[in-house]
Image: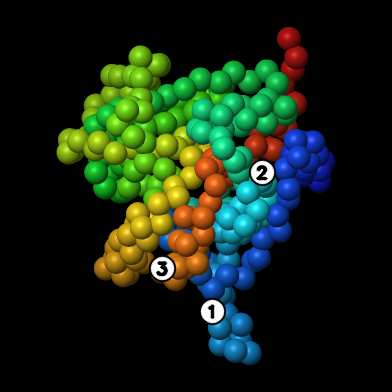
Amino acid sequence: MTQSDFLRSIRQYFWGQNFTEVEIPYLNSSLPLEPNIYAFETEWQHLKQKYFLPTSPEFALKKYLASTPQNCFAISHCFRDLENSSPLHTPEFLMLEWYEINKNLADLKKSSQNFISHFLPNLSFENLILPPNLPGNEPNFNQFFLNQIVSKLPQNKAVFITGYPAFLSPLARIKKESESNNFSERSFWSKAKHVSTAKINLTSDRFELYINGIEIGNGCTENTDSISIKKAFIKEQKYRRKAKLPLHPYSPDFVNICKCLPPCSGIGLGIDRLLRLININDKQPRT
């Protein structure tokens, strides 16, 4: 399947379900300030005005949702700095992002599975819940996740991973204690050697979707608590200044938009990676 065919199929899929497509701007004076995500900077020379390229379509889609509460999607080029380059990882890539109003994380899982199955009909899905005791900071968590989770993922299935610490995902709703995970589900980490760490009680209402061991999407129930979002952005701002990492301004407008969102869930999905998997699958001999 060519990229052109795939993009047309994606649009037809969502238009057929009455989603509205949203066009996003590429020059932004501010962006959400999230852990592990660094923006490219450019400048309008005429007015000496700094702009930042989008790291996802999220800002524009949430602005649309706050004023027009209906299911929507966007397909856009996204740009992320300070990341390695590989056949699966490039600084510029295509992302599909969509939002569904009045839907929770379980609903979003189902709609994500339906979308993926539209292109990979024979793919099987399962769930993985992270352990309750996880590293309490970003570098240690990333190392644990890479060594103990990603390396053990199946290479022939799709896996929804949940149970992420809340500090990693300020734009995802924090799970309530009464919504704690049921650890009777299959867990690849049961025999893993845990990193010594303090217990983390708060988890986000979020999943990551891996297919054949490759990260494809990141979805969540959206956080509408503007106070917690602003605190998280300020904390990330202080961390980057101290660590001398690239820093872009966060937008007070975005923070205010979040509190005006309808109850909704959304997912960002890598188009290039998914198309690669579809084409690999199409080349495999049928049995």
Residue at image position (40%, 16%) is 186
Residue at image position (41%, 68%) is 246
Residue 269 in picture, x, y percent from top left: 60, 42
Residue tagged by mark 2?
Answer: 71
Residue 12 in picture, x, y percent from top left: 81, 39
Q: CA distance from mark 1 to mark 2?
A: 32 Å
Q: CA distance from mark 1 to mark 3?
A: 14 Å
Specify the label residue 50 is tagged with: 1
- Of tags 3 and 2, the one toward the viewer is 2
Is 272 drawn above or below residue 76 in the view shown?
above
Residue tagged by mark 3?
Answer: 246
* Disc with the residue nearer the chain's start (1 vs 2): 1
* Disc with the residue nearer the chain's start (3 vs 2): 2
| Amino acid on which disc 2 is placed | Asn
Quarter of the rendering containing residue 101: top right
Residue at image position (48%, 45%) is 222
As drawn, is 190 to the left or to the right of 257? left
As drawn, is 95 to the left or to the right of 32? right
Residue 250 in picture, x, y percent from top left: 44, 67
Q: CA distance from mark 3 to mark 2?
A: 34 Å
Residue 116 in picture, x, y percent from top left: 66, 30
Q: Residues within 10 Å of mark 3 (few under 14, many from 20)?
A: some
Secondary structure state at the residue bearing disc 1: strand
Specify the label residue 34 is tagged with: none
Residue at image position (44%, 30%) is 161
